[in-house]
Amino acid sequence: MASVFSSIEARIYRVFDRQPPQGRLHRAAFWLLIVYLVLCATGFLPGIIGGFSRGLRGWVLFALAIISLWLGARGLSRNMLWKVRNRLIVTYLLMALAPIVLFTILALAAAYVFSGEFAIFAVTSEMHRELAHLEAENQAFAIHVSHVLDDNPGIRSVSLPERNIQGRDHIEPGLEMAAFRDGKRVPLDGVANGAQTLESPAWASNGFSGIVVDKGSLYLRAFHSISSGGHETVVITSVPLSKESADQIATGLGMVTVLPFFDLGEEGTGSDRATASSGKRSGFKFNGEDLGDTGPATGRVTGGKPPRAEHFYDIAIDFFAPLSTTDWHTGQPHFIGILVNSEPTLLYRRLVITSLKGQSIFQTLLIGLAIFFGMLELVAFIMAVRLNRTITQSVHDLYEATREVDRGNFSHRIPVRRKDQLAALSGSFNSMTSSLEGLLQEQREKERLQNELDIAQEVQANLFPRDDVSLPSLELHGICRPARTVSGDYYDFLLFGKSGVGLALGDISGKGISAALLMATLHSAVRAYRFAGEELVHEGVRALHAAQASSLDGAKGVEEIDCGEWFESPGKILALLNRHLYRSTQPEKYATLFLAHYQSESSRLTYSNGGQLPPLLLRRDDSVVRLDRGGTVVGLIDGMTYEEGSVQMKHGDILVAYSDGVTEPENDFGDFGEDRLIEIVRRNRYLPLPVICEQVMQALRDWIGAQEQPDDITLVLARQV
């Protein structure tokens, strides 16, 4: 299915000579566009299909718009931020302007909260000031009433000559007072009739002043008790929290609304009931939300007027805070809410009311300081852009220089205009381009040498046996892994007719090209002597046949010249090779070499070891025979002779010949060793010889680990069938 969609995309884009989309979002946008076009076409159809298409295409268009906006923003971001200059500017904005914006937001939020708290503080201060005044008056009234009753116990009513209660109505509308003597109400002259509703609370013993809830209304109320002559006199003064008192509290602050958090019932203040009877209700908005009517059903009291902005920074400050009140009958605490709607100018005037003459100057200084800081930020931004330009100009010069070098123009130089680190970088680039030509020349020379080494490796690989050699009674397999490109190790298999085979394994001193060349010399010499012996054997056989045809005595003389036996002797061949290498190579050059000849009729292996690590013959009964007969290394001392040894190979016996690269690799546990080699061969002895060799190689790789292969590795296996 995916291939079908991809084929359709490719065909459509081929019409417009464009490459088909690769990303998932691009493909999603493409198919959404196709679906939208199909829905637009089917939208003209009548019936359910047309209605469904018209209803669905809006959602498809919305999804297409979202993906397109995302792809457009991503493409714009990639194109804009490709230049280092734009990246640095964006980085500066993120590092410099972002903290300023965050701190500014934090400062504005803190200023808003502080302004709101200050507005609440101003409102509560006005309430507390009124309460303090009310408490002082109530205490004076209580002392006066107590003295009057002490002097005239039978008096029917007490007048308050210290204060004209009726004259206070225009200041504190709805003022009410009540007096009690030993729990009995004492009539007071000049007190409003509503005062008869005041009751002395049982929970207040000495004195009290605060905002109380009484019969569903809010009051500023003071209570004072005096004991004199065995009698207790109580005086209560109460002022309702009405619109008039709220107006007085909100003077110079804006608008104040008291929001009760309890059910006020159907009763309220006299003004509230009048408002309810007239059917008029006033509303209040907080943060643009209509909080509802302020009628008697809610007991909400609003005073003041909404502030009007005087300056551009005069934003509406709407703040809310809870205020504790007391239930007059039970003494339980209640809470009401105070909502203040003000602006910075009004709050600032209230804050600096003691120095109104200097507030405008101070305010102007603050605005000027803010403008000055803004100018400093602008100057800093311009300087940062200019510094960024010096950086990006150097990057641009380097980019253009790399393009010139990519075209092969090594004579291009970057103009150095300044003395800074970027200018030093440009100078370093100029120095680099001046020496790059020589480096490339050296690289070409190295590539030529590497090609020659590859050829040498290929030639050397042809010197090793290409295929495994086997006789009906013997299997042979060998492997060589060079530590470098070419190897100084050597092994070879030479067949003699159908019943004999020669085996050679050697290790040249040193590594690299010189060892590989000496290895080739040794390989040629071994084969030359072997093939020479084979030719002499053939010539001896022909001479024998001729002598038998002529005379019996001649045949006897030919039998005495057994050249083939002489050249099949490993010890004699080692002696010849020692003389050859000693006279044709440098004194420090030598080789270790193991030669063996196997005869299939007798299953006997004749060998001679010239300084090579002794091969190991693993018998079928797991015993091990070391083939160590021979002599010293080949090519170091002239005139050396080499002993020969012989072993009889039986069914299942395995000959293991190896170079020092097999047993001498080290790690933290020591050398790989002969014992570990024999154990691997013993464990896999019935597997094919190539598999056994691979098991040994894998064990060596695991033993060496991540280290470089220290020496050439050569392994030859021969198994009696």
Image (cartoon, grey):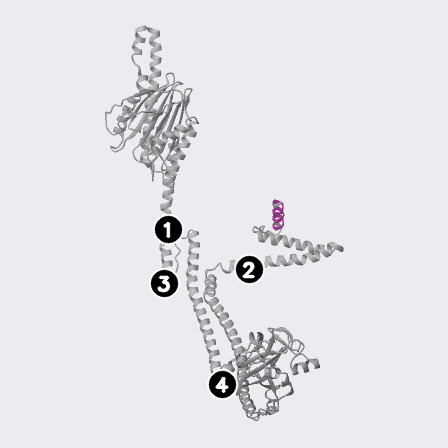
The secondary structure type at the circle numbered 3 is: loop
Is 442 in the magenta? no
Q: How many C-alpha atoms fall within 10 Å of the one at disc 2: few (<14), some, or many (≥20)?
A: few
Residue 391 position, x and y percent, is 42, 62
In which quarter of the view is residue 503 placed? Answer: top left
Q: Amino acid at mark 3?
A: Asp
Dot 2 or dot 4, earlier in sequence: 2
Q: Quadrant of residue 394?
A: bottom left
Magenta stretch, overall SS: helix
Front disc: 2 or 4: 4
Identify the residue under disc 4: 356
Whichever of labels 2 and 1 marks the residue nearer the N terminus, that label is 2
Cα distance between the residues tagged 2 and 1: 41 Å
| Circle number at residue 420 | 3
- Closer to the eye: label 3 or 1: 3
- Closer to the chain start, of discs 3 and 4, is 4
Q: CA distance from mark 1 to mark 4?
A: 78 Å
Instruction: Point out the image quarter for the C terminus.
Output: top left
Q: Residues within 10 Å of mark 4 (few under 14, many from 20)?
A: few
Q: Which mark is residue 436?
A: 1
Q: Nearer the viewer, residue 281 or 309?
A: 281
Indicate the position of residue 554 as horizontal and vertical percent values: 30, 8
Q: Earlier in the sequence, mark 1 or mark 4?
A: 4
In the image, the segment drawn in magenta is: 3-13
Lower position in the chain sequence, tag 3 or tag 2: 2
Q: Which residue is mark 2?
A: 73
**Secondary structure at numbered mark 2:** helix
